[in-house]
Image (spheres, helix red, strand yellow):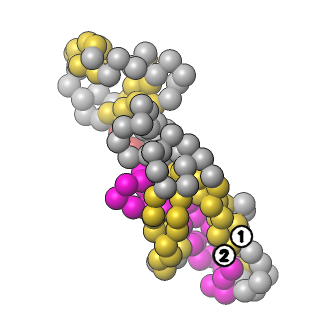
Amino acid sequence: MQQFKIDSPHGYLHDKNGRVVLNFANFNLGNHQVDDSVRGVTYIEAPNTHPKSVHWIYNSGIPPVTLSVDSGQINNDGTDETVVSMTLDANADSDRQADLIIGGKTFDVSLVPGEETIETITTTARAGTVIEIEVNAPDVQRATTTVEVVNA
């Protein structure tokens, strides 16, 4: 552990590669004990303006999942497909079972460290609907994204 001076109440601490080690908000100003990996600080205006999520380091804590979709929009004809991609951090120590939640419906997925898991979705929802997609479990960091439904 090391002493690190905080000069503004909102920001994030990062390691030598620029990866976020700790997001902070409403911190007391002054010196704080922080992990030895911390090499710098970036201040932000308010807690809700954090642009980055905490990076999982040293195989401790809960590993992150990268979640993405191949398109931000999907046609509502029931045949147009959007690919949902999930990848568990390669440094995770084991496979993880997680919930893939698409528009409120839950599906079980198995995530293998460093390997992409893919699901394909279609919809007949009304145009303008935003489908929320989430991966979550007690032993993985929550990840979310959205897809907008458009007319075919």
Where is the C terminus found, in terms of image quarters?
bottom right
Residue 42: name its quadrant. top left
Does 133 appear in magenta?
yes
Question: What's the mark number on residue 54?
Answer: none
Where is the N terminus found, in terms of image quarters?
top left
Crowd tier of the residue under label 1, counting other residues whose Cα lies within 10 Å: few below 14, some 14–19, many 20 or above:
some
Specify the amino acid type for callout 2.
Ile
Q: Which residue is mark 1?
A: 82
Magenta range: 122-151
Residue 48: name its quadrant. top left
Q: Nearer the N terminus, badge 1 or badge 2?
A: 1
- In space, the residues marked 1 and 2 are separated at their CA atoms by 5 Å
Q: Position of residue 141 (x, y in %)?
A: 42, 51
Task: Using the image as rendered, state which of residue 97 and residue 71 is in the foreground.
Answer: 97
Q: Secondary structure at mark 2?
A: strand
Query: What residue is shown at x 57% (from left), y 72% (from top)?
Result: 131
Q: Which residue is mark 2?
A: 121
Query: What residue is shown at x 50% (from left), y 18% (from top)?
Result: 16
